[in-house]
Image (tube, rainbow, N blue to C red):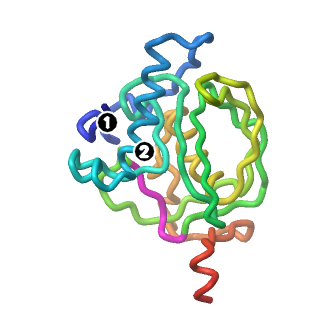
Amino acid sequence: MILMKDIITEENPLLHKKCENVNLPISEEDANTLNEMIDYIFNSIDEEIAAKYDLRAAVGIAAPQIGILKNMLVIYAFDEKGNEHFYAMVNPKLISYSDELTYLPGGEGCLSVNRPVEGLIHRHKRVTVKAYILEEGELVLKTIKLKDYLAIVFQHEYDHLQGIIFPDRVNKENPFFVPLNSTPIKFQEEEKND
């Protein structure tokens, strides 16, 4: 079981290294790592388990965050309309993306960054990803399209595989600058309050 003590933080040089592809067919060791990452996500959002083990809630985790420099990531998040999405990916590749950008108005957070980070991170509003995705216990090569919040979550985790953490992406001179081609993410609840 992955605990907070197993999550490496931004000072660790491993978080700033590029990951390598996972050899396929996947080894038992790599499959166990992927399953432990999945377990962490679900444990972190289970109130009872999270409280018992003092876990920080997460919508994503990447292998380098537990000190393993391999191209694996897990996402479990809800889109703007409240639809559930789960992806356990091996060897993901970002194959195309929109020029249009988006951002989270409150900024981003990360299990590996234990400090407040002021500023906005502008990411591609739509991405197309090719990856081996876990489906019913099997890795299946698929191409998927993600947009808005899910695209942000994917790009955040994908950055980890490239040795990039989100504070690296904040505009140092003007942290709250918003380019003309970037619009904020709006969740359903927020729209009701407008």
Q: Quadrant of residue 184?
A: bottom right
Few, some or many residues within 10 Å of mark 1 (<14, 14–19, 20+): some
> Which residue is at a point 24% across and 53% down the rendered structure image?
51
- Position of residue 187 measured from the top left corner of the image (x, y, whole percent): 60, 71
Q: Secondary structure at mark 2?
A: helix
Secondary structure found at label 1 = loop
**Rendered location of residue 68, percent (x, y):** 41, 23
Residue 75 appears left or right of 50 = right
* Nearer-the-camera pick, 139 or 22: 139
Vertical placement of 5 versus 190: above or below? above
Residue named by callout 1: 8
Q: Residues within 10 Å of mark 2 (few under 14, many from 20)?
A: some
Query: In the rendered image, which quarter contains the C terminus?
Result: bottom right
Q: Nearer the viewer, mark 1 or mark 2?
A: 2
For the point 49% across and 45% down, the residue is 60
Q: Which residue corresponds to the image point at 38% horizontal and 60% vertical from the top-left?
A: 117
Badge count: 2
Q: Residue 192: image x %, image y %?
A: 62, 85
| Magenta stretch: helix, strand or loop mostly | loop
Magenta stretch holds residue 107: yes
Q: Residue furthest bottom?
A: 194
What residue sits right under mark 2 in the picture?
A: 42
Please say whether residue 37 is one of the residues in the magenta stretch. no
Position of 146 with respect to 115 (left or right) is right
Q: Is residue 26 above or below residue 174?
A: above
Q: Residue at x 64, y 59 (%)?
A: 83
Label 1 with label 2: CB-CB less than 8 Å: no
Task: Examine the image and state in which quarter residue 81 appears.
Answer: bottom right
Is 113 on the left or on the right of 25, as rendered?
left
- Start-end of magenta stretch: 105-110
The answer to whether 101 appears left or right of 51 in the picture is right
Q: Position of residue 107 (x, y in %)?
A: 48, 64
